[in-house]
Image (spheres, rainbow, N blue to C red):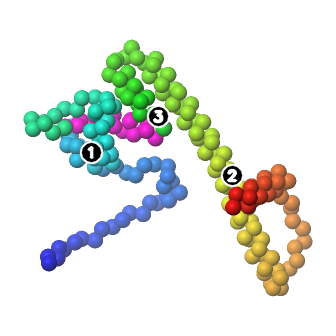
């Protein structure tokens, strides 16, 4: 058995852990002054698989990729920029057929600006609708978390009061009737779903 000497790896902690979901993981940096990459280098840069890259080329999502004298694909910085855009379009939920159509329109030239505008405008409308749905869902989660947090604190407070460690409460501001009824409805819906 051979033992290899290793060097310790330091893992940098994210200074702003609240933003974990706001950005994709950092990508492998491109070398300065280089404009020709193998498929394995592109896999490292983009996080896509070699199979996905070949599929993108086969369906027309990628334009013709240059080849070396041995037939290996050679991607350029322009190809990597295009893949970055395709990744953004995928995140919007744009169907693959629409992404391929967009790629075709780009290859056809400037006279297709109107069609490209319409395609992207429709996608933006869909994204905004999904964001609104997610904001509504987040509001429900926030209310449920507040409800359970308040209930947990109230039980702990009540337990300390019964043990004689806290005085009886004088008066408390009543919670808004709307929030109480919404919380009650959500709690009842949760119970009936069990």
Q: Secondary structure at mark 1?
A: helix
The part of the image, by quadrant, that contains residue 100 is top left
Residue most extreme to the right: 170
Q: Which mark is residue 94?
A: 3
- Circle nearer the N terminus (3, 2): 3
**Quarter in which the C terminus is drawn:** bottom right
Q: In the image, which disc is placed on residue 140?
A: 2
Identify the mark nearer the N-term, 1 or 2: 1
Q: Where residue 41 sits: x, y (%)?
A: 23, 46
Of helix, strand and loop, which one carries label 2?
helix
Which mark, by number, is residue 50?
A: 1
Of residue 30 and residue 55, the one placed in the foreground of this image is: 55
Please report the residue visible at 74 percent of the width from the left and 71 percent of the height from the top.
153
Task: Pick the quarter of the image with the N terminus.
Answer: bottom left
Q: Are marks 3 and 1 in contact (CB under 8 Å)?
A: no
Tell which tag, 1 or 2, sits nearer the viewer: 1
Confirm whether the magenta stretch covers residue 82: yes
Give the main secondary structure of the magenta stretch.
helix
- Is residue 80 visible in the rendered structure shown here? no
Task: Say above or below: 141 vs 52.
Answer: below
Say if mark 1 contacts mark 2, CB within 8 Å. Answer: no
Image location of residue 36, percent across then percent down: 19, 38
User: Upstream in the sequence, badge 3 or badge 1?
Assistant: 1
Residue range highlighted in magenta = 74-92
As rendered, which of 126 and 84 lies closer to the eye? 126
Q: Magenta stretch containing residue 119, yes or no? A: no
Q: Which mark is residue 103?
A: none
């Amino acid at each position: 058995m051979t033992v290899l000497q290793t060097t310790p790896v330091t893992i940098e902690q994210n200074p702003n852990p609240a933003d974990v979901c706001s950005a994709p993981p950092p990508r492998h940096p491109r070398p300065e002054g280089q404009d020709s990459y193998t498929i394995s280098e592109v896999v490292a840069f983009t996080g896509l698989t070699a199979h996905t890259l070949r599929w993108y080329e086969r369906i027309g999502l990628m334009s013709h990729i240059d080849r070396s004298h041995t037939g290996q694909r050679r991607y350029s910085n322009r190809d990597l920029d295009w893949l970055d855009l395709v990744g953004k379009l995928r995140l919007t939920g744009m169907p693959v057929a629409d992404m391929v159509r967009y790629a075709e329109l780009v290859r056809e030239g400037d006279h297709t600006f109107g069609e490209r505008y319409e395609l992207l405008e429709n996608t933006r409308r869909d994204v905004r609708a999904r964001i609104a749905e997610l904001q509504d869902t987040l509001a429900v989660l926030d209310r449920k978390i507040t409800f359970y947090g308040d209930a947990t604190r109230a039980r702990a407070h009540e337990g300390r009061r019964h043990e004689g460690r806290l005085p009886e409460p004088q008066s408390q501001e009543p919670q808004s009737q709307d929030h109480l009824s919404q919380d009650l409805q959500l709690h009842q819906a949760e119970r009936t779903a069990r």
